[in-house]
Every structure is written in structure tokens, then in C-alpha cells.
């Protein structure tokens, strides 16, 4: 059976390029299968070369940027005639495509809480959406959010994948390094990381701490007031802060660091940084919020970022106990195997084929 012609549509802010990719672009690249084309905003640097990419064309349109992007995507669907379209994280775009091409099988993959998105805030809106397109969430926590408050419909969970075969080899002896890697914003709890490390580093002089990240993904991230404040606090505590780094360098750092901390305040819809750290064999300290527990399971220590004594205690346990770090690292690698993209990619392809088979009766997907 020939592979389906899949068009994967990125959100307009994502860039399908190694030097600019955010979390969704990284996932789209990682999960792409035979016959798939990724479309999105033209990046400023060369796009990935191993997966076909087509920039969304510029369209003269009398409205805003998102309306022009929608019009460009619609134009590509008309010319490319895909078997199935997969839209990431933009319910408004999925509904616009469905209105224009109701005969085209359509999947919407949600990476964030739909209760905070335009066109899916209310149970009524989510119910209507689930009866028009095939809805996928990347975690069971997100699925529960979608179906909360009485919303109905078929919602399938397809977790994010990690290409374990492409991860850099872990260092035979890991550095005495406590690492934070991610966006340097309050929601990610990086300020709690700084406070905890400021408390612990004087007690553990053989250890170092590092922050990799900026306000946004990409080398042109702005210098925000929060970032300036965190930089000053990190410098005072002896924590190095490198700014934005390409994803490959982040993974290399995770492969060296003894401990990786994911102290998110907000309810992480999934927790990709935690999964990557686990795949790299680091001992992980994670927040108990959102979808993170569904990713790390029992393979991490938990600490609420706004409970500083608990966060300090969790880090101190790992920093003072090499055997515990080794045990947690082994458990993390074993847990990460559940999310290997080599296993999840065929599941995704099977789901897409099922969508094509039952379209437009998306409710029948519950029987798959």
C-alpha cells in the first residue's frame, strides 16, 4: 500500500530549520514519515534537508497576518492535493481548512491547553470541533482538558516522540552539573532554579549550575525585563547562563549533566525537555504540574517550584548521592524507551490511515 501524502502544517511562528526550530517544529521533523511534506513560515536559515519543506506562500490579503497565513495554506492544499492534512496547535486554522475543503481528511494536533485557545475555550466550541476534525492531544492530561466541562467527541492521545537512536552518547562520567534548559520565562520556573542553586552551590563547591535558553527559541530572542533580572541573579549565584543554543547543543549538554531540572510553574501539556533529559540518561527533578507526571512517571524526583525547601531538598539528595543519581538515570532511560519515535511513528501513520478511511465520520475513530 503506498504511503499517504501527508501535509503537516506548522503554526506560523514555528520555523522548520535546525537553527530556529521550536518544540513543534522539532517534533514534526522527528516524526515525519514517507510521503510527508511540512509547510510553514519560511525560516531565516536553511531548513531541514532530510524532510521536504515548502514555505507557505505570501498572499495579498486585506486582513491580518494569520488570515494571510490561512490563505497561503489553503492555496497549498489546492495545488498539492494531499491525502490528509495535519494541523499543529491552531484550531482556528483547522476550522478554516475544513470550511474550505470539507472533503479533505483533517487532523488537529494539540500541544497546548485548548481551554485557553481561541475557538476552543468553551465546551460547546470543543464539541463542535471534535465533530468536524480528528482531534489528537499529545498527553492524556490535554485530552482530559479538552473533554472537560461536558465537552464530547473522539479525542486520541498520540504522545510526542523522541528519536533515541539520534541522541548524542552520554558521557561515561557525567559532569557535576545541575542544568536548566528551556525558555527563560516565569512559567518555566527558571527563577526557582536560580534560588535553589544559590542555596546549594556554596554547600557543594564541586558542583556547577547552568541555564541554557532565552525568552524564545531562536538566536533573535528579545532581552526581556524578566531575563535581565534572572541573568543578574544567576551571575550573583555563580550560575552560568549561555542564552539560546541550537537543539543539538542542548542535547549534548543533557548528555553531560548529572542532573536536569524541569521546574515548570505552568501546567506543561507534555514536558519535552524532561523526556529529552531522560533519554540522555540524566537524573531528573520535575514539577508535578500538567502532563509532566505522565511523561516522567516514577523515573524522576518531584518538586513544586514555588516550594523552595522541597526543591532544594530534592536537588541536595541527588547532588550528595552518586548511587541515587545513577539509579535515577537508568530509570529515566528505561522510561524514555516508551516514547521512542521509531515505535510511535507507525502508530501515527496508522491513525492517519484510519482518519482517511472513515472520513468524514470522525466519531468512528473511537472504534479504531
Image (cartoon, grey):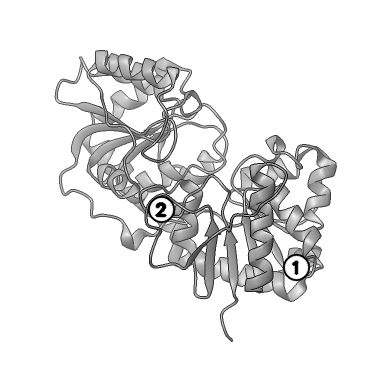
**Front position in the image: 87 or 363:** 87
Label 1: which residue? 367
* Up/down of 299 relative to 347, above or below: above
For the view shown, which residue lies furthest in the bottom direction? 1
> In which quadrant of the rendered view does residue 165 lie?
bottom left
* Up/down of 41 relative to 144, above or below: below
> In which quadrant of the rendered view does residue 151 lie?
top right
Q: Does dot 2 land on a helix, a strand or a loop? A: helix
**Real-space Cα distance between discs 2 and 1?**
28 Å
Q: Are marks 2 and 1 in contact (CB under 8 Å)?
A: no
**Front position in the image: 206 or 355:** 355
Q: Is residue 156 visible?
A: no
Q: Quadrant of the C terminus?
A: bottom right
Q: Is residue 254 visible?
A: yes
Q: Rate crowding at label 2 as few (under 14), some (14 to 19) or many (20 or more) other CA atoms within 10 Å.
A: many
Closer to the chain start, of discs 2 and 1, is: 2
Q: Position of residue 160 (x, y in %)?
A: 51, 53
Q: Position of residue 225 (x, y in %)?
A: 44, 17
Picture disc at residue 336: 2
**Front position in the image: 347 or 83:** 83
Amino acid at each position: 500500500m503506498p504511503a499517504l501524502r501527508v501535509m503537516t502544517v506548522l503554526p506560523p511562528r514555528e520555523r522548520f530549520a535546525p537553527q530556529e526550530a521550536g518544540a513543534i517544529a522539532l517534533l514534526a521533523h522527528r516524526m515525519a514519515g514517507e510521503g510527508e511534506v511540512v509547510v510553514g513560515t519560511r525560516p531565516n536559515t536553511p531548513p531541514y534537508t532530510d524532510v521536504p519543506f515548502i514555505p507557505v506562500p505570501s498572499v495579498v490579503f486585506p486582513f491580518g497576518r494569520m488570515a494571510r497565513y490561512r490563505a497561503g495554506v489553503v492555496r497549498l492544499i489546492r495545488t498539492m492535493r494531499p491525502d490528509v492534512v495535519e494541523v499543529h496547535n491552531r484550531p482556528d486554522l483547522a476550522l478554516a481548512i475544513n470550511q474550505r475543503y470539507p472533503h479533505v481528511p483533517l487532523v488537529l494536533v494539540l500541544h497546548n491547553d485548548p481551554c485557553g485557545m481561541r475557538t476552543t475555550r468553551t465546551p460547546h466550541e470543543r464539541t463542535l470541533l471534535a465533530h468536524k476534525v480528528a482531534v489528537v492531544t499529545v498527553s492524556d492530561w490535554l485530552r482530559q482538558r479538552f473533554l472537560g466541562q461536558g465537552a464530547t467527541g473522539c479525542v486520541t492521545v498520540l504522545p510526542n516522540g523522541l528519536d533515541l537512536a539520534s541522541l548524542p552518547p552520554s558521557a561515561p562520567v557525567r559532569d557535576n552539573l545541575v542544568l536548566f534548559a528551556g525558555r527563560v520565562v516565569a512559567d518555566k520556573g527558571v527563577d526557582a532554579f536560580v534560588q535553589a542553586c544559590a542555596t546549594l552551590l556554596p554547600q557543594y563547591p564541586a558542583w556547577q549550575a547552568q541555564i541554557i535558553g532565552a525568552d524564545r527559541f531562536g538566536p533573535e530572542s528579545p532581552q526581556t525585563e524578566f531575563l535581565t533580572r534572572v541573568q543578574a541573579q544567576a551571575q550573583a549565584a555563580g550560575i552560568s547562563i549561555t542564552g539560546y543554543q541550537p537543539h543539538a547543543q542542548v542535547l549534548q549538554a543533557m548528555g553531560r549533566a548529572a542532573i536536569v531540572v524541569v521546574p515548570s510553574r505552568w501546567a506543561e501539556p507534555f514536558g519535552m525537555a524532561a523526556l529529552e533529559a531522560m533519554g540522555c540518561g540524566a537524573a531528573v527533578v520535575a514539577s508535578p504540574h500538567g502532563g509532566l507526571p505522565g511523561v516522567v512517571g516514577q523515573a524522576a524526583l518531584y518538586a513544586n517550584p514555588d516550594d523552595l525547601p522541597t526543591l532544594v531538598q530534592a536537588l541536595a539528595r541527588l547532588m550528595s548521592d552518586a548511587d541515587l543519581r545513577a539509579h535515577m538515570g537508568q530509570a529515566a532511560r528505561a522510561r524514555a524507551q516508551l516514547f521512542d519515535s521509531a515505535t510511535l511513528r507507525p502508530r501515527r501513520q496508522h491513525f492517519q490511515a484510519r482518519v482517511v478511511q472513515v472520513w468524514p465520520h470522525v466519531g468512528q475513530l473511537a472504534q479504531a
